[in-house]
């Protein structure tokens, strides 16, 4: 650790940083979402937004980060950083942060970000908030978010604190208890304030070519030797089957326990409906736990958070853990046999009926409506 | 050789969850269970015990009733357990919790050849942070999201899941492995196990036993000391009730398709 590093000396920290994850030399889409969100936070603080990018021969993808809003990219390249290892990435990130001292540090909550961020937070001696879905620095922005995003009576609430400056500290909001509760977390006494952010939640900004060309690339000093890495990566295997892109989809047709009497038939109907709409198939936790669909199809608190134009829920009761992943969809359509199913509470349109009877009719009706356009 | 497994008793968030008017969770009204991923970690340890005869030790931090969970795990085959419990530890965030658990694990003693298993994440907070933070405090190499664990001599080889595939990683012991449900199916308690569970050793580690441990910083534990604090908590708003369509026949479906087309949604 740099000898002068003290995470409690909060005045010594400045600027917003985003860890930009790449795999096999390709930027993960979440990095662009985080850069876009980081831009908002940096503007609220009046500071610079910087990406930190680790890898081997990845300079070529660094400037893309500028296109989404980064002012600078700290680029750390080494053959030892080609494949992700906890030890190498933690060491390089912590060494650079101890030298340059950002006040905010964001990671994508991917399987890698969630391995790396806690390790870094423990080493840097600071707080970390997991799986955030909303971030604010500006208090007014936060209060406006609560006005629509909570059931709180914000006009009669006190947001002041004697312990810290509520207008300068990052307010990190996340679901807890399977989505039953939302909590806003602060880290007032230590820096950097760290958060992992749920993929698919933050909106990407439009790409700005001029800003991409203007991004400043900096190569910070770091020391990394093979002996620093205690784990040995024997192989990296990409899934053989093409994974479903739930996060990027405009139309999602999801199935739930309601397909249990004919699992194959139910999935086939969902696939047909998704095809007519130009969308993809998702599933509730029950369908993944039962092995009916692979894990990449899972929507919900423990799966993916989605906000498509249309979300069609076939035979999904609407447990809170499912709703937490899809209630921000622009239009929700639910088909369920049980008229008291909680999914109807959030559906824009509900049909109470047997999905095996309704779905084929819906496919035909949508085909006809599209043909008539 | 021994395997230490960290476990947590959690409210069952898959069932009915009651929220108090002030936005906090009504824990008294909820069932508690052993965190599901932790059950996979316990099973992984018991499988290695079946193969090698090693000792399995469970550690939890929580209020005194967590003893019930530890007895159940001992009825499954865990040999010994530790309950880390003190009022001073209450309200700890993941940073604070991990230093307390790291101090407890170091007190129990993790030696060459030993393993530390944890669940990937607990269903109450879903953070997945305590495992890696313990790993950092104990200076152990870690492998998270384990879907397969093979031990040979003093190395373990783990299939580590990614969203788009997996990595195969080898590491020397001692090390930390965090476990996911794809790893195994946890066993049930056995009748003999239930009888034996009450004669197996269970040790309580309180504030007095741990406060002088070098890994504990007294001013960063508990509700007040934790680096992160809850600023506000609230329930998400209910979306306005939408339109229930009459019937479930061809006309209903055509009406819906018409509505979607009129709004240019399809």
Image (cartoon, rainbow, N blue to C red):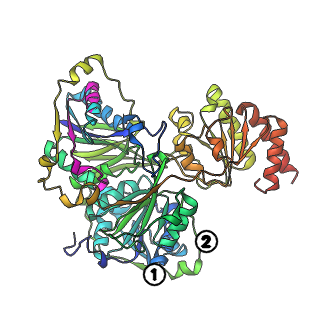
Q: Earlier in the sequence, mark 2 or mark 1?
A: 1
Magenta residue span: B70-95
Whether residue B153 is visible, yes or no, is no
Relative placement, left or right, of B102 versus B232 is left
Say whether residue B93 is magenta.
yes
- Between the residue at mark 2 and the residue at mark 1, the CA separation in whole angstroms equals 21 Å
Q: Nearer the viewer, residue B258 or A210?
A: B258
Which residue position is annotated with label 1? Answer: A46
Q: Nearer the viewer, residue A280 or A127?
A: A127
User: Are there few (<14), some (14-19), or many (20+) residues within 10 Å of tag 1?
Assistant: few
Residue A195 at x, y = what percent?
40, 62
- A168 over A356 or under it: above or below: below
Whether residue A44 is visible, yes or no, is yes
Residue A344 at x, y = what percent?
66, 42
Residue at the spot 21% in from the left edge and 69% down from the top edge: A1
Residue at the spot 18% in from the left edge and 50% down from the top edge: B103
């Amino acid at each position: 650790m740099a000898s002068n590093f003290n995470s409690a000396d909060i005045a010594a920290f400045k600027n917003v940083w985003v860890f930009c994850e790449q795999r096999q030399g390709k930027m993960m889409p979440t990095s662009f979402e985080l850069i876009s969100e980081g831009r908002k936070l940096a503007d609220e603080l009046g500071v610079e937004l910087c990406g930190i990018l680790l890898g081997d021969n990845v300079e070529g993808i660094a400037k893309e980060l500028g296109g989404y809003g980064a002012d600078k990219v700290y680029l750390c390249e080494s053959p030892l950083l080609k494949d992700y290892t906890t030890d190498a990435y933690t060491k390089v990130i912590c060494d650079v942060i101890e030298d340059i001292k950002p006040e905010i540090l964001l990671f994508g909550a991917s399987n890698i970000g969630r391995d790396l961020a806690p390790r870094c937070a423990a080493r840097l001696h600071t707080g970390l908030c997991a799986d955030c879905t909303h971030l604010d620095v500006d208090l007014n922005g936060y209060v406006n978010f609560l006005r629509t995003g909570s059931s709180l009576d914000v006009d009669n609430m006190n947001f002041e604190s004697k312990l810290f400056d509520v207008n300068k500290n990052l307010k990190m909001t996340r679901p807890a208890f399977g989505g039953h509760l939302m909590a806003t977390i602060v880290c007032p006494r230590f820096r950097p304030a760290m958060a992992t952010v749920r993929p698919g939640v933050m909106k990407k900004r439009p790409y700005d070519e001029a800003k991409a060309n203007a991004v400043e690339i900096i190569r910070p000093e770091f020391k990394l030797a093979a002996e620093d890495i205690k784990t040995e990566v024997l192989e990296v295997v990409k899934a053989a089957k093409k994974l479903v892109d739930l996060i990027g989809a405009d139309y999602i047709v999801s199935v739930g326990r309601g397909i249990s009497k004919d699992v194959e038939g139910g999935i086939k109907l969902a696939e047909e409906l998704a095809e007519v709409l130009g969308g993809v198939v998702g599933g509730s936790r029950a369908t993944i736990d039962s092995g009916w669909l692979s894990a990449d199809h899972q929507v919900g608190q423990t799966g993916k958070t989605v906000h498509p134009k249309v979300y069609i829920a076939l035979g999904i009761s609407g447990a809170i853990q499912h709703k937490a992943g899809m209630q921000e969809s622009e239009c929700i359509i639910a088909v369920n046999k049980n008229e008291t199913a909680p999914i109807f509470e959030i559906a824009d349109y509900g049909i109470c009926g047997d999905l095996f009877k309704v779905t084929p009719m819906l496919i035909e009706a949508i085909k006809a409506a599209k043909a008539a356009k | 050789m021994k395997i230490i497994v960290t476990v947590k008793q959690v409210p069952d968030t898959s069932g009915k969850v009651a929220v108090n008017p002030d936005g906090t969770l009504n824990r008294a009204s909820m069932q508690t269970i052993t965190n599901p991923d932790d059950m996979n970690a316990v099973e992984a340890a018991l499988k290695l015990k079946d193969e090698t005869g090693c000792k399995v030790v469970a550690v939890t931090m929580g209020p005194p009733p967590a003893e019930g969970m530890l007895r159940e795990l001992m009825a499954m085959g865990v040999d010994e357990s530790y309950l880390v419990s003190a009022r001073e530890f209450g309200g700890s965030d993941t940073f604070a919790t991990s230093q307390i658990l790291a101090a407890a694990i170091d007190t129990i003693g993790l030696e060459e050849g030993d393993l530390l298993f944890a669940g990937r994440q607990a269903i109450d907070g879903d953070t997945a942070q305590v495992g890696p933070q313990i790993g950092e405090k104990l200076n152990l190499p870690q492998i998270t999201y384990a879907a397969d664990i093979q031990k040979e001599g003093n190395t373990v080889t783990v299939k580590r899941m990614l969203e788009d595939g997996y990595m195969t990683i080898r590491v020397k012991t001692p090390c930390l492995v965090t476990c996911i449900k794809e790893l195994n199916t946890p066993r049930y308690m056995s009748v003999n196990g239930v009888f034996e569970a009450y004669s197996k050793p269970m040790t309580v580690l309180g504030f007095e036993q741990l406060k002088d441990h070098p890994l504990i910083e007294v001013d960063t534990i508990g509700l007040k000391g934790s680096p992160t604090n809850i600023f506000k908590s609230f329930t998400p708003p209910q979306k306005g009730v939408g339109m229930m369509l009459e019937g479930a026949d061809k006309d209903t479906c055509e009406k819906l398709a018409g509505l979607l087309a009129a709004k240019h949604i399809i």
